[in-house]
């Protein structure tokens, strides 16, 4: 059976003694708790379970007053017809006191659920809804009527509540699948917050102004119109406005005093809260202060609009100095990378909660969330709101009584199989309905230097093998910490090396010594390629990685032919650690290495340690034609156009021959980062493609004979001993 979870419970995150004491005195404060590195979303002063959702630790309210619906699942509460007829608080005041007394408790409970959330039993399990989620399910009108409960949406709203509570956070960047309901959920939150906020601005942006307007008129306005009178402030202007929704009378919680008040509308202080939309542009909302910014379809902003530029501007609308006063709810599927997807991808990756600055903020200020499509695909959610992963063994029904015949995983695989011959169609399907973040940012097969069809075939095949042991993570070490002794490979999860093949013992550490210099003993088995770096750190601390790849040749040894067996893409704390890592790998495998010499410190390290014999000379020149430096340390430059073309051609040929689906099955390149780097490779901008550089150099090293300069042959006339005669006249004469 397919199993997947979007969160885990941390039962031991807080010591029981501390938890009980704090709960007893209602001491847990809403917001980020530095002592326990978690975000408290409880507003009761008490907490219960600690969830971890995408590396964010979130403390839920303590379980209490758990409601049990008749059907053992979420069911919207009945809205009394008598109240439904009441449109405003002023209409309410016209009713007799005896009538109003019947509904005071009902109205108070709704306000409490809105504020604190709601516990209920779902499929025999106590389940918590945030106040925002409750408002969405109970009081929001969407295109199909009332929303259904989905477990994925529950976790989405819990994550969003944590973003709201955390004073270090500007909001969320949500990577989603199509028809996940984000636009409606964001619209519901917009109305929910606006109707309880004073002197506040709420903004909407989308991939185009027309889309933002449509979200406003078709989602935000209908939700507002359908709110019950006790949640809805008096609205200024048209009932269904086209540009701005303005609340002018406050929506404060009902009390006996406010309800029986005889104040006239003109005497009341207005909320002065508005919701509007703007045309798409880098400077949209510049200079304004926003309580909430809804960023819909942010992965589809196409040139000249740029979501990164816009976020740099709109981020300032959510803060006063260092204090964050507003939040952003951003969500989207991704376009192809050259159609806005690249910028959204960067924004999403910059929102990783595990990567924070000294102020505790992510690089973007947002928190990233990804929910795989199998959790949110219409038609494959059961009546309890849970996804039907596997094809059911017994009858399963959806929320509206429709029978679910197959599981969502089988359905998705069927769709993928049907698109195998249409790579662009397959990539689009992946982006629309991703099961991984790699699917979500899958690129078009157009305008690529290499065969993307084959590359993605291999990537997908590797994804299916992710639970196997094809790739081992580990480190190389000198035996007994004695440099120049034997090197050993140690598997460990913190290692920087990924390895798919280890040579048999008789081939390990095969090194030849000549005149005090070490040479590789397995040159006939394979070679390494390396794209190095020279300095330990850069000014922006974002320098490129050092990259190393190992590749085998065809040989008579017990070695898999034409196989990339090692990948190293890392930037250790010091350059010297990187240099020694590379050296140890070469010694362990006993293979030479071709290194780019534009950053020569690694080459000098090899020479200084006595391993100049491992460092290959450039294969495209005779030794006599090498420069003095090239003779001294070896290596190959990256500046020559001929080298660039030869390097790219080597990768292209290898992909065609050994990657993706072949007659004999799939290729055996199991390094996903390398495959993804090949897919993005740009020959005119190679600096960001470390993996492509080193893997291409490994290919050139293993096929150095192809690049050897051809000897210029001087052609001399050959004397065959045959004389030529001039036969003019009566006597023949020899022509000298």
Image (tube, grey):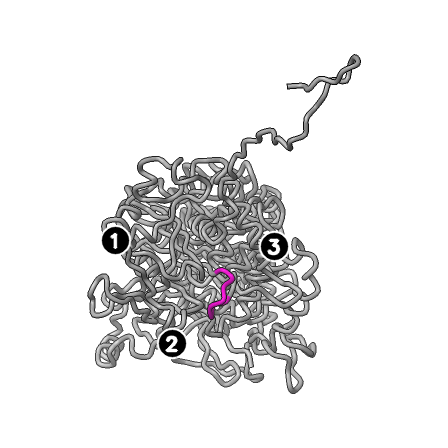
- The foreground one among 364 and 713 is 713
Tag 1's secondary structure? loop
> What is the spatial separation of the Cα atoms under label 3 and label 1, in whole angstroms?
42 Å
**Sequence-first tag of 1 and 2:** 2
Task: Describe the element under mark 2 as helix, strand or loop.
Answer: strand
Give the residue at mark 2.
9
- What residue did someone put label 1 on? 515
Compared to residue 451, the image places residue 55 above or below, namely below
Q: Residue under circle 3?
A: 656
465 displayed left or right of 321 = right
Q: Is residue 378 magenta?
A: no
- Residue lying farthest to the right in this orientation: 730
Q: Nearer the viewer, residue 542 or 172?
A: 542
The prevailing secondary structure element of the residues shown in magenta is loop
State the residue at coordinates (49%, 60%): 553
Determine whether 161 is above or below 626 in the image: below
The residue range painted magenta reads: 553-560
Where residue 673 appears, as percent x and y from the top left, is 46, 57
User: Looking at the image, is mark 2 or mark 3 earlier in the sequence?
Assistant: 2
């Amino acid at each position: 059976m397919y199993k997947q979870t979007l969160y885990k419970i941390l039962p031991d995150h807080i010591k029981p003694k501390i938890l009980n004491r704090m709960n007893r005195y209602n001491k847990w404060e809403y917001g980020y708790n530095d002592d326990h590195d978690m975000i408290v979303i409880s507003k009761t002063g008490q907490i219960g379970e600690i969830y971890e959702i995408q590396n964010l630790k979130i403390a839920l309210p303590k379980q209490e007053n758990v409601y049990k619906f008749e059907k053992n699942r979420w069911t919207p509460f009945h809205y009394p017809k008598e109240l439904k007829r009441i449109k405003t608080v002023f209409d309410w005041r016209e009713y007799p006191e005896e009538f109003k007394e019947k509904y005071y408790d009902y109205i108070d409970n709704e306000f409490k659920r809105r504020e604190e959330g709601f516990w209920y039993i779902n499929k025999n399990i106590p389940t918590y809804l945030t106040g925002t989620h409750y408002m969405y399910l109970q009081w929001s009108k969407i295109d199909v009527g009332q929303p259904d409960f989905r477990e994925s949406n529950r976790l989405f709203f819990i994550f969003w509540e944590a973003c709201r509570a955390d004073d270090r956070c500007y909001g969320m960047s949500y990577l989603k699948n199509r028809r996940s309901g984000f636009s409606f959920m964001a619209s519901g939150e917009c109305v929910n917050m606006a109707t309880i906020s004073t002197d506040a601005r709420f903004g909407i942006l989308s991939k185009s102004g027309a889309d933002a307007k449509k979200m406003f008129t078709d989602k935000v306005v209908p939700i507002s119109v359908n709110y019950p009178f006790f949640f809805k402030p008096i609205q200024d202007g048209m009932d269904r406005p086209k540009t701005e929704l303005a609340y002018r009378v406050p929506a404060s919680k009902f009390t006996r005093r406010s309800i029986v008040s005889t104040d006239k509308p003109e005497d009341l202080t207005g909320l002065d809260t508005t919701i509007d939309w703007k045309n798409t542009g880098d400077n949209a909302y510049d200079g304004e202060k926003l309580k909430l910014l809804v960023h819909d379809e942010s992965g589809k902003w196409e040139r000249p609009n740029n979501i990164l530029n816009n976020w740099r501007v709109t981020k300032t609308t959510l803060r006063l100095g260092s204090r964050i006063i507003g939040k952003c709810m951003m969500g989207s599927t991704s376009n192809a990378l050259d159609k806005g997807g690249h910028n959204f991808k960067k924004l999403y990756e910059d929102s990783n909660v595990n990567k924070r600055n000294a102020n505790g903020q992510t690089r973007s200020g947002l928190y990233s969330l990804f929910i795989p499509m199998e959790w949110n695909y219409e038609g494959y959610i059961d009546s309890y709101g849970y996804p039907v992963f596997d094809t059911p063994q017994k009858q399963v029904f959806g929320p509206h009584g429709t029978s679910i015949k197959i599981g969502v995983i089988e359905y998705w695989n069927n769709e993928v199989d049907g698109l195998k011959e249409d790579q662009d169609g397959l990539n689009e399907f992946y982006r629309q309905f991703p099961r991984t973040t790699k699917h979500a940012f899958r690129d078009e097969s157009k305008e690529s230097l290499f065969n993307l069809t084959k590359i993605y075939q291999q990537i997908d095949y590797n994804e299916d093998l992710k639970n196997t042991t094809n790739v081992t993570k580990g480190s190389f070490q000198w035996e007994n910490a004695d440099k120049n002794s034997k090197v050993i490979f140690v598997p460990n999860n913190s290692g920087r090396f990924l390895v798919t093949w280890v040579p048999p013992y008789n081939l390990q550490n095969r090194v030849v010594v000549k005149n005090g210099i070490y040479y590789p003993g397995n040159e006939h088995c394979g070679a390494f390629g390396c794209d190095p770096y020279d300095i330990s750190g850069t000014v922006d601390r974002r320098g490129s990685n050092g990259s190393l790849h190992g590749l085998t040749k065809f040989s008579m040894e017990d070695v898999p032919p034409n196989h990339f067996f090692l990948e190293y893409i890392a930037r250790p704390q010091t350059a010297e650690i990187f240099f020694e890592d590379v050296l140890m790998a070469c010694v362990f495998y006993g293979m030479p290495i071709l290194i780019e010499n534009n950053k020569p410190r690694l080459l000098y390290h090899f020479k200084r340690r006595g391993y100049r014999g491992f460092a290959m000379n450039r294969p495209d020149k005779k030794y006599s034609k090498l420069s003095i430096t090239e003779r001294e340390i070896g290596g190959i430059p990256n500046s020559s156009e001929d080298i660039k073309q030869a390097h790219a051609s080597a990768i292209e040929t290898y992909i065609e021959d050994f990657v993706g689906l072949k007659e004999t099955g799939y290729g055996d390149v199991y390094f996903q980062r390398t495959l993804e780097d090949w897919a993005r490779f740009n020959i005119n901008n190679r600096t960001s493609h470390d993996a492509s550089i080193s893997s291409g150099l490994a290919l050139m090293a293993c096929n150095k004979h192809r690049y050897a300069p051809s000897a210029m042959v001087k052609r001399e006339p050959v004397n065959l001993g045959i004389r030529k005669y001039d036969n003019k006249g009566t006597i023949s004469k020899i022509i000298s």
